[in-house]
Amino acid sequence: MSDQETITTTTTSAPTTHLFPFTSTLEGPINSKKYFQFEPTPSLEHKHKTIETFETKLMGRRLIGYNVQLPENVNGHIWQYVQTPHNHHEIEEEEEEELQPRLIKKSSPEISRFVLWKKDTAPNDQDARLKAIEDWHNITNAVHEPIPL
């Protein structure tokens, strides 16, 4: 990835999308305005001293995070697993088909930035999740590059 295409961090207002360092078996909406509150924490030391850092506690875990801005030509989407019949067009009333998890895109706006969270310390540039985003961006660029004949 060239220097112009790398993922950058910003100090703008906090986005509403968050990438946590853990998963949860709970699915569905929560009252995030009440139960998930975070504030800028300028006293934290990390590599990006000029970047606005956030701190919160979630499910008993201390989390530290900062804004990540995706490259200009990259947008993210929110996907969700839902339980649906494997082929809902061919289901007969007498025959019940086992529900299969399927990945569907939620109806939400595209994501151009998010807060990257890490437990107990601020994420750094070598975070595996950032590297995965960069790697996928490199793969998509390679796939869409014209092949010289």
Image: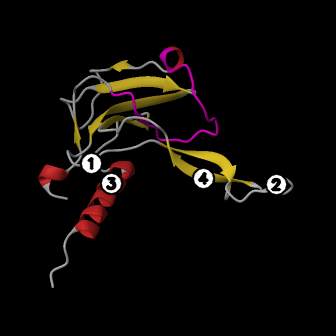
Q: Quadrant of residue 140?
A: bottom left
Task: Indicate the position of residue 112 as horizontal and vertical percent values.
Answer: 29, 38
First along the sequence among labels 2 and 1: 1
Task: Indicate the position of residue 48 as horizontal and vertical percent values.
Answer: 22, 35
First along the sequence among labels 4 and 1: 1
Task: Indicate the position of residue 125 as horizontal and vertical percent values.
Answer: 27, 47
- Look at mark 3 in the image and give the residue it sits on: 131
- Look at mark 4 in the image and give the residue it sits on: 102
Who's the residue at 20% across and 31% down the image? 49
Q: Quadrant of residue 123?
A: top left
State the colouring used for the structure image: secondary structure
First along the sequence among labels 3 and 1: 1
Who's the residue at 67% across and 49% down the image? 84
* Mark 4, secondary structure of its residue: strand
CA gap, disc 2 and disc 1: 41 Å
* Mark 1, secondary structure of its residue: loop
Image quarter (top left, top right, bottom left or bottom right) of the N terminus: bottom left
First along the sequence among labels 2 and 3: 2
Query: In the drawing, what numbered circle is on residue 114?
Result: none
| Residue 54 horizontal side relative to residue 37, left or right | left
- Look at mark 2 in the image and give the residue it sits on: 96
- Look at mark 1 in the image and give the residue it sits on: 74
First along the sequence among labels 4 and 3: 4
Question: What amino acid is labelled 1 in the image?
Answer: Val
Who's the residue at 40% across and 32% down the image? 17
